[in-house]
Structures are given as C-alpha cells and as structure tokens.
Image: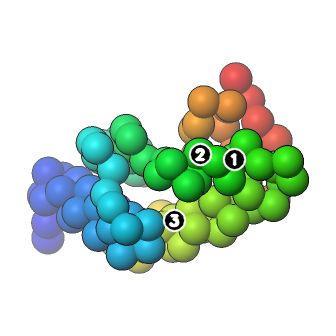
Amino acid sequence: MKTKGELETEVSNAVIRFKREYMGRGPQDVRTHLIDDMVLVRLKGVLTPAEQRLAQVEDAHRGRDLIKQVRLELRCAIACLSGLFYFAVATGGGISDDRGSGGSRT
C-alpha cells in the first residue's frame, strides 16, 4: 500500500503530465494534499494565455465550456488514482461541483 506522500506525489505528477499533454505546458506550481476522504490539488499558473482569452471572449460561455471539458478529463484522471469520484473545484469565482448543480459558493 502506498503512503500518503507517495499518493500525493503521484497525483501531482499526473496533473503535471495531463496539463503538459493536453495544454502544452504544465502549471507553475502543483501541491496535492490528501485530507481524510478528499484530494485537494492546488495549482498556480494554470491557464495559458489562450485559455485566459477564451474565458474573456464575447461568447464567454463557449470559452468556459471548453475549459470545463478539459477539467472534466483531469478529474477523471484523479479519480482513477484516488478512487474518489465526487469533485468540487475552487476557482477565483467560487466553488463548482460536478453533480450538475453548476452553483457556486463563496
């Protein structure tokens, strides 16, 4: 059985690999924390300049939908490693979850 530190490192490395493969570069910083039954992954410098522009395009919903689609694939990769299948994602705009509510809490 893997130690907590080993699993945290594996998740961090999986996030870096995923971002490099799908986005062309990795985040500036990745920290993973296993807390009880939660996996907390903190990323810094995640959005590429193209993603930043997508989030601000005139049809903002379309750009954000593309970003959300990529994040869903990343969530699936983390679920395979951790065995956890419910995720909430905290961003500068609040917390969104994958249960379809689309709501945010601050």
Q: Residue at x 57, y 38 (%)?
A: 90
Q: Which residue has dot 3 on it?
A: 75
Q: Which disc number belongs to residue 81?
A: none
Secondary structure under the numbered disc 3 in the rendered image? helix
Kind of residue indicated by mark 2: Gln
**Alpha carbons under labels 2 and 1: distance apart:** 5 Å
Q: Which residue has dot 2 on it?
A: 52
94 left or right, relative to 20: right
Name the foreground residue: 39 vs 71: 71
Secondary structure under the numbered disc 2 in the rendered image? helix
Colouring used for the render: rainbow
How many circles with numbers are drawn on the protein? Answer: 3
Number of the front mark, 1 or 3 = 1
Kind of residue indicated by mark 3: Arg
Kind of residue indicated by mark 1: Ala
Quarter of the figure with residue 3: bottom left
Q: Which residue has dot 1 on it?
A: 55
Q: Residue at x 56, y 55 (%)?
A: 50
**Alpha carbons under labels 1 and 3: distance apart:** 20 Å
Name the foreground residue: 97 vs 35: 97
**In terms of sequence position, does the residue under pointer 2 or pointer 3 come before the other?**
2
